[in-house]
Amino acid sequence: MGQCKCLEAPKQLTIEGIPIQDSVDQEQDYQIQRILQPLKLYETLPLPSYYSSVAESYEDFSPEKNIPEDSVCTDFVVPNIEINQIPETTFCKNYPKSDKAFKLSGFIYKGQWKKFEPYGFGVFVYNDGTIYIGYSVNFNPHIYGKKLYPDGSEYEGEYLYGSHHGQGILKNKEMIFEGIWQSNVPVKGKEQWKDGTIFQGEYKEGKKCGFGIMKWKNGNQYEGMFQDDQFNGYGVYIFADGYIYEGDWLNSFMHGRGKLIYPNSSYFEGEFINDKQINGFQYSLNGLQQTVSQLSPDSTINERSYHKIDRPSIKTSYIEFKSVYG
């Protein structure tokens, strides 16, 4: 008689063959994040039901008959804006489209209508120079569209009643962000800055928070945990000159238990406070021989503290650029 499968022990998760036990160890948490939960940049939020629902018909409504004639803009020219993709949706397919542009409060509009308001696909040119092309509901960008701001910033992607929500790309003079948005703030994505800095990871309330990878043009790289736009928790920092630090961080400083590996494969392992080695052991290699010396707060060695770390605070979240929200 075969064994009842319901009595079988649950499969033991492992990292590189080592069983994962219940633990609050930050290094283990980091490894679980890194190996078991890799970043998925292009996952999307569930599509709302209106993507497939068919709207009621307003074929009997004509904006030309129901809006005063003096609202018509006879000299309006639709801006030549390239939009990468427009998702297929049936929510507005029965709404009429006017061939005329109308000047309303705060903007000029040309496109589809529902009763007395823009509704469906169309073009908005706002009084401040902002331009939006895409779907709209109740005067707000909705489902998908592209918005260009007077300062040169632009956003193209998914919207939910005026908010960036879903997959989208933001570009401005300093950087490009591509990823997932929720209620106008990033959830997960990739930043590419003009100076060569790259960040790919997770966010909370618009700030880098969770697992992420940050690279600088000079070759330095950090991979690990973030909180409030800073290195916080366990992480690995690789210096372009060959040094490697792996261990605990606090507000972007080496702080707590850690290991600093030198280019010659010697290393220090012990306690750090604000980037300084405080207490631990220095392991030096001399051919095949290894010597160990204890380092105390009063010790002095040549390779103590001293490496310029690129702090992430110089690259805070792009949502500080107010032009995102016009």
Image: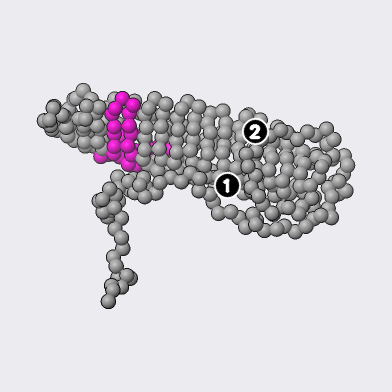
Q: Which residue is mark 1?
A: 165
Q: Nearer the viewer, residue 8 or 276?
A: 8
Q: Position of residue 73 (x, y in %)?
A: 83, 36
Viewport quadrant of the N terminus: bottom left
Give the farthest residue toward the front. Answer: 1
Q: Which residue is mark 2?
A: 149
Disc 1 marks a residue whose amino acid type is: His
Whether pointer 1 and pointer 2 mark residues with C-beta atoms closer than 8 Å, the reply is: no
Q: Which residue is rendered at x = 49% and y = 41% of the image?
A: 189
45 to 198, vertically: above or below: below
Viewport quadrant of the C terminus: top right
Q: Secondary structure at mark 1?
A: strand
- Visible residue check, residue 295: no
| Residue 278 lies within the magenta run | no
Is 220 placed left or right of 21 in the picture? right
Is 105 placed left or right of 264 in the picture? right
266 to 92, vertically: above or below: above
Which region is colored magenta? 229-257
Q: Which residue is rendered at x = 56% and y = 39% of the image?
A: 169
Q: Position of residue 192 (x, y in %)?
A: 49, 32
Q: Position of residue 282 (x, y in %)?
A: 17, 32
**10 Å neighbourhood of mark 1: few (<14), some, or many (≥20)?**
many
Q: Which residue is rendered at x = 58% and y = 47% of the image?
A: 165
Disc 2 marks a residue whose amino acid type is: Tyr
Alpha carbons under labels 1 and 2: distance apart: 18 Å
Q: Secondary structure at mark 2?
A: loop
Q: Quadrant of residue 54?
A: bottom right
| Residue 238 lies within the magenta run | yes
Q: Nearer the viewer, residue 326 or 32?
A: 32
Q: Which residue is rendered at x = 57% and y = 37% of the image?
A: 170
Is 217 placed left or right of 84 in the picture? left
